[in-house]
Image (spheres, rainbow, N blue to C red):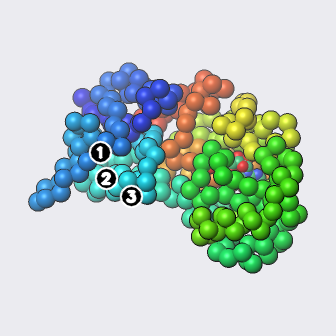
Amino acid sequence: MKKLGIAVTDPDDWTARTFIETANSKGLEALAVDLREAEAAIDKDRSYMAGGLDLRELDALIVRDMGAGTDDALTFRFDILRELEMEGMTVVNPPSAIQNAANKYHCSHLFSRAGIPIPGTRVVQDIETALRTLDHFQDAVLKPVFGYKGIGISRIKEGRIIRPDGTDSGDNVKGLLTSLLKERGMIFIQEFIENPGRDIRAFVIDGEVAGSIYRKAADGWWLNNLSQGGSPARCTLGDEQENICTRATEATGAVFAGVDIIEGPEGPRVLEINATPSGAGIFRVWNINVTEHIIDAVLKLL
Ligand SMILES: Nc1ncnc2c1ncn2[C@@H]1O[C@H](COP(=O)(O)OP(=O)(O)O)[C@@H](O)[C@H]1O
Ligand SMILES: [Mg+2]
């Protein structure tokens, strides 16, 4: 019986739970792996244990969730994944793809190289250039490079900081830029793309779109994340959109991914890609179980 590890931290998470159930129903031995408990022993030989399980005994490892932690701890968990891969294990998504996707700046580079349309993107490290960039775009969003769930994103339109609900915060732009520079040392700035108050999350697996949903913001809001009050609805992609989503996934090296695109006045733009996506939204709206297709894709690699 093949042993399939699923890296999860929250056993109640729909995606984590369904991975385990689906793997068991396919006759695999599914084992939950909590990377927060992983430890390594390196001498002449190498051992990687997590919760009493010898990770080298797995045939494959699917990464749903690496867990939160300090930079050192996260780097260590990534290192374990890279090392298991070097020892010959199939790790999906490949750690390099997870890293590419998590980094919004580097992803912009990968997308641009692959000819995938993205919003205009700038990274700056000083306040004067930041102000000039905001002036250039007129309407822009500032995002944490390693952000998620719409957390920590600001919008600055014509010199005003716009709250997620679309109202003017009245806060001082220079003050915001100063504190961002102090906190992060750099600012990732993207042109704001006018859109119909929704964006699209497409789930790509093994080179194909398995399903997609709209995420509609609450009235007047400009943040469409489901975790920020957005609501999901069925979406069927056109050929151009499908093509962009599968190419974006390929550009990061991911086997499966959630690709966020926004419908701008000049066509679709890829906002970001998530290589450890939740399957819950697509299941709720389409009744499509992405874990089924992901496990099939992993079995093909063994
Ligand atoms: N360039 C942009 N133009 C318009 N809206 C944007 C832009 N970037 C982000 N947003 C809005 O903010 C949300 C979160 O941005 P995203 O890049 O997906 O980061 P996160 O990783 O936090 O989800 C998007 O779903 C979208 O609603
Ligand atoms: Mg997003």
Residue marked by disc 1: 38
Q: Mark 2 Cα within 10 Å, few/some/many (few <14, many 20+)?
A: many
Q: Find the distance from the CA under tag 3 to the CA under tag 2.
A: 12 Å
First in residue order: circle 2 vs circle 1 = 1
Q: Answer whether residue 121 is visible to the viewer in this image.
A: no
Q: Quadrant of the N terminus?
A: top left
The answer to whether 38 appears left or right of 201 in the picture is left
Q: Position of residue 247 (x, y in %)?
A: 60, 54
Residue visible at 74% across and 55% down? 154
| Residue closer to the observer: 250 or 131 | 131
Q: Secondary structure at mark 1?
A: strand
Q: Amino acid at mark 2?
A: Ile
The quadrant holding residue 70 is bottom left
The answer to whether 225 appears left or right of 87 in the picture is right
Residue visible at 66% across and 47% down? 150
Nearer to us of marks 2 and 1 is 1
Nearer to us of marks 1 and 3 is 3
Q: Find the distance from the CA under tag 2 to the CA under tag 1.
A: 8 Å
Q: Name above or below for residue 283 compared with residue 265.
A: above
Residue marked by disc 2: 80
First in residue order: circle 1 vs circle 3 = 1
Q: Answer whether residue 84 is visible to the viewer in this image.
A: yes
Q: Which mark is residue 72?
A: 3
The answer to whether 252 appears left or right of 230 in the picture is left
Q: Position of residue 60 (x, y in %)?
A: 32, 41
Residue visible at 65% across and 48% down? 151
Disc 2 vs disc 1: Cβ atoms closer than 8 Å?
yes
